[in-house]
Amino acid sequence: MFKENSIKLMGTVIRCGVAHPFGDTLLTEAFRRLTDYEKTFSANDDQSLLMTINQNAGIKAIQVPAELFELIEMGKKESLTSGGLLNIAIGPLIKLWHIGFKDSQKPSDDKIKQVLPLIDPEKIQLDKQQHTVFLLVKGMEIDLGALAKGYFADKIMAYFKSEKATSGFIDLGGNVLTFGDSPKDSSGLWKIGIQNPALPRGNNALVLNLKNLSVVTSGIYERKIKADGQVFHHIFDSKTGYPVENDLASLTIISEKSLDGEIWTTKLFGKKAAEVIRELNNIPNIEAIVITKDNQMASTTNALAQF
């Protein structure tokens, strides 16, 4: 029997479904784990373990649970090697603009320049044996928002599979992971809508039909502010301190692991649409769909043909 339910967490509505004789029990446990993840990984909760690391920047190392250490370690590695926008040390810049919150603002150039030296992943010191994290400079802050939902989705799906579920999905808002056959279509395929950036929420530019895959979309169309006659979105270039400027309105990654989708959407959002497609056409098992600010759509060679 297929069971599904939802919970409001992480600033969005999270939906999960699972095919299992004790589906309600699995969903309850999944939501418990997601609630714990939020308490551990949140950069917006002063009581979270992640914020304990940030609050002790320049003071001392903090011992953390294995999962938090794992994601920080992976995030630091990707931040140093990505050559793109991914940078988990971007916390001070995110807090300065705070786009998506009531106190969002366009900071002065001077304030932006003050925080740029703090956005340095090299200064995240990790001790793998002790599972400690130390931010070497006071004022540094880790923000895992670019990676966390994908990490959580993969963990929850692994839990469902470990309990011998025959199918399931998790939808964390802009991040959907599927497994097995959909109970809602005779083909067994899951229908995943890609938001049209030019229209209100719920209007799809296209609908993908797939299974055993993740769909992660990042876009500039929801979280933004207006200031000085300009519109500023929430995807930042940590080199300039300002939102990235290019022709992208949204970037969707289709992959086996949700975390891979998070990594690639963040890495590549700083590039132009044509560059994104060219680069990902050379990466196996990763497909992409881009929608530009003038509402043009393009995809990697196999993306739309396959799905």
Image: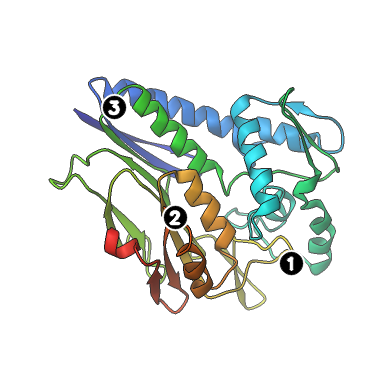
Residue 231 x, y percent position in the rendering = 59, 72
Q: Earlier in the sequence, mark 3 or mark 1?
A: 3
Q: Residue furthest left?
A: 186
* Looking at the image, residue 17 lies above or below residue 11: above
Residue 222 x, y percent position in the rendering = 49, 61
Q: Secondary structure at mark 2?
A: loop
Quadrant (top left, top right, bottom left, bottom right) of the N terminus: top left
Quickly name the residue at label 1: 240
Q: Earlier in the sequence, mark 2 or mark 1?
A: 1
Left or right of 185: which side holds 256?
A: right
- Numbered tag placed on residue 165 in the rendering: 3
Q: Earlier in the sequence, mark 2 or mark 3?
A: 3
Tell me if residue 156 can be seen: yes
Taking depth in this image into account, of 46 and 284 the one nearest to the observer is 284
Quickly name the residue at label 2: 284
- Numbered tag placed on residue 44 in the rendering: none
Q: Secondary structure at mark 1?
A: loop
Q: Residues within 10 Å of mark 3 (few under 14, many from 20)?
A: many
Look at label 1 and name its amino acid: Thr
Quadrant (top left, top right, bottom left, bottom right) of the C terminus: bottom left
Residue 254 x, y percent position in the rendering = 40, 54
Look at label 2 and name its amino acid: Pro
Label 2 to label 3: alpha-carbon separation: 28 Å
Mark 2 or 1, closer to the camera:
2
Residue at 53% over, 55% down: 264
Label 2 to label 1: alpha-carbon separation: 32 Å
